[in-house]
Image: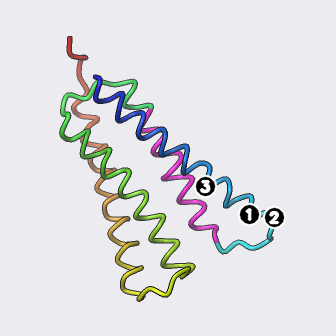
Amino acid sequence: MKHQKVWSLWLVRAAAVFGLIGAGLGAHMAGSGGYQFRAIHAHILVVGWLSLFSWAAYYRLFFIRSKKIAALHVYTALIGTIGLTGGMWLEFLKPFPLPDIVTLLIYIIGGSILLLSFFLFLLTTFWIGEEEK
């Protein structure tokens, strides 16, 4: 179960970072009256804050018998969340003069990795067992 505590800590720390970024974007939009970040803000809070935090709690509450599936889930969760939300920012707001195909690929690949993460999470729910002694 030690590995699950480490994964939980990674996820909760990442959730805290995304929560702060999401709240900051919300405050910026409210203060400026400009809502160009609303889709990114929503995804950062729902995927970055809520999902990652929920998964952090899940790994503290349940023992997952398949360490490989659980580890892959955590890695894809972190990479996919960063890829999706970063890709959205690059694709929608174009802060850098990158080719459209590059920003689109970051967005699509990040989202695909995150979708894989949700599937892997589903699989982990079928490998819940008693904690190792």
Note whether 109 is above or below 45 in the view shown: below
**Residue 99: x, y in percent?**
41, 89
C-beta proximity under 8 Å, tags 3 and 2:
no
SS category of the residue bearing label 3: helix
Q: Are marks 1 and 3 in contact (CB under 8 Å)?
A: no
Tell me the kind of residue under disc 1: His
- What residue would you read off at disc 3? 21
**Are dots 1 and 2 in contact, CB under 8 Å?**
yes
Numbered-mark total: 3
The residue that mark 1 highlights is: 28
Instruction: Pick out the residue farthest to the front.
Output: 96
Q: Is residue 115 magenta?
A: no
Give 44 or 129, whichever is nearer the viewer.
Answer: 44
Give the magenta part as a residue range.
Answer: 37-56
Q: Which residue is mark 2?
A: 31
Q: Earlier in the sequence, mark 1 or mark 3?
A: 3
